[in-house]
Image: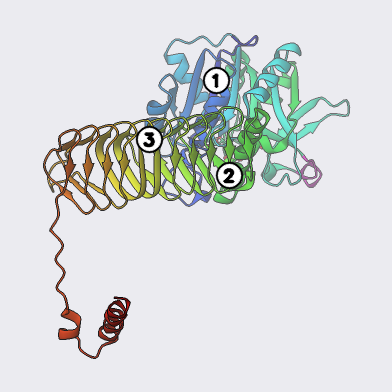
Amino acid sequence: MSANRPAAVVVLAAGEGTRMKSSTPKVLHAICGRSLVGHVVAAARALDPEHLVVVVGHAREQVAGHLAETEADVRTAVQHEQNGTGHAVRMGLEELGRDGVALDGTVIVVCGDTPLLTGETLTALAATHATDGNAVTVLTAEVPDATGYGRIVRAADGAVTAIVEHKDATDAQRAIREINSGVFAFDGQLLVDALGKVRTDNSQGEEYLTDVLGILREAGHRVGASVAADHREIAGINNRVQLAEARRMLNERLLRRAMLDGVTVVDPATTWVDVTVTFEPDALIQPGTQLLGATHVAARAEVGPNSRLTDTTVGEGATVGFSVTDGAEVGPGASVGPYAYLRPGTRLGSKSKAGTFVEMKKADLGAGSKVPHLSYVGDATIGEQSNIGAASVFVNYDGVAKHHTTIGSHCRTGSDNMFVAPVTIGDGAYTAAGSVITKDVPPGSLAVARGQQRNIEGWVARKRPGSAAAEAAQAALQEDEGDK
Ligand code: UD1
Ligand code: CA
């Protein structure tokens, strides 16, 4: 448990985010496999707060629905009209109050659109707040361009006296580059009292949370600030340019951590990972690779180049190149691609192979078995050490229902086979090239299911006289005569 466990964290996520130009609410846009508000909630969890409440307003059903699905323990409070950040916090605290939560202790306020904010920064803010005995501590940052932000006004002795919104600031105040990140630590009781005194006589006619600072200071309480080490961490997302920038920064952070933990990332600029992806040391990631969802890459496995793996487990020493996988399990030492597509329910045993232009779905390939070329394997169980000939299709669909094919161990099936499911090939059986297998094959048998070959001699000379083919045939036949 964290030393400065807050009573509550309030996440503000009621704003509309019009500049996203999207039918999706801003805070539900995702980077690195998690929504913007999801990232903020994850950072807030580092504080181990007693209560976590997200204030929703614009598209509140969608946002609340998303939270109910992904963050079951988070409460939501509704702000029906977006009357300002102070009003939003008031709605959040009133919701907790209705549930009988007493706000004895610290209340942290964060915005729902700052996905790069870390738990470390919040923990540092909470620590400063506690150590300095402040009524309020604001997280600030020095930014290159402060346009649009609230400015931190300090007295000659450095004490924070007020936050002035850009729209309400004088020219002298607009020259200040230290800005309000929108993240605060408050004494809960003092916050509740001060919010009751916030007025709306400003350029936007809103209840500004920032006014709480001046109110508390005038009442003789301590007001402090904590300066963020990296201003980029507190950047809010307003448009899709900023969304892409944040995605790249978060991705870099995730890859940096992986590399420091022993993963080789050949080209971090073209490697994209979700926050949920895990690695073991000496995994090797080649350029142009996306690793998504619950993907795990084990030690000495090599993934990429140019691959997308979703919810896929790659075993020790396995390789996956130029391929797309989803919900697949690639066993140790197995080989996938180039140009394979593994769909949900595919399980490749150790040292098995799904080769070039191979698609597999709900297929279990035993240890050492191979599907090397140009094949579709759907709804199948294949034993160990079997080889599936090139250009084979597991005919699993009769137009209405899917059926299963079982192939035993140590089988050698010919090229260009159709396995018309449901069908079973016994251990050690062979099938002839070009066979359409519709009946079960007993262990150790050779199944041949194709038309017999018939050669009609002299057909070209008779039917295509004078053609190049006829001349070539005649020359070859004469040469054969001469050899005799
Ligand atoms: C706010 C701060 C400003 C700070 C900036 C940092 C105030 C008055 N100003 O300005 O000092 O530099 O954030 O990004 O606090 N929200 C609601 N309900 C509302 C209004 C806002 O939930 O009624 C939420 C928004 O969804 C957003 C956050 O509060 O997550 C900040 O709102 P926004 O409108 O972006 O505030 P700014 O005007 O940028
Ligand atoms: Ca605003």
User: As drawn, is 136 to the left or to the right of 73?
Assistant: right
Q: Identify the element where label 3 is drawn.
A: loop
Q: CA distance from mark 2 to mark 3?
A: 21 Å
Write the residue at 54% across / 23% down. 10
> Residues in magenta?
170-177
The quarter of the image holding the C terminus is bottom left
Q: Disc 2 designates what residue?
A: 286
Q: Could you give the CA–CA distance between mark 2 and mark 1, rounded to whole angstroms?
A: 33 Å
Q: Amino acid at mark 2?
A: Gln
The residue indicated by pointer 1 is 45
**Mark 2 residue crowding within 10 angstroms, few (<14) / some (14–19) / many (20+):** many
Q: Please, is residue 7 above or below residue 352 in the view?
A: above
As rendered, which of 71 and 10 lies closer to the eye? 71
Cβ atoms under marks 2 and 1 closer than 8 Å: no
Vertical order, 472 against 368 (above or below): below
Q: Secondary structure at mark 1?
A: helix
Residue at x 54% of width, y 25% of height: 42
| Whole-number angstrom distance, CA of label 1 to CA of label 3 | 28 Å
Give the image location of residue 217, x and y in percent.
73, 21
CA neighbours of label 1 inside 10 A, class few (<14), some (14 to 19), many (20+): some
Query: Is 160 situated left or right of 303 in this image?
Result: right
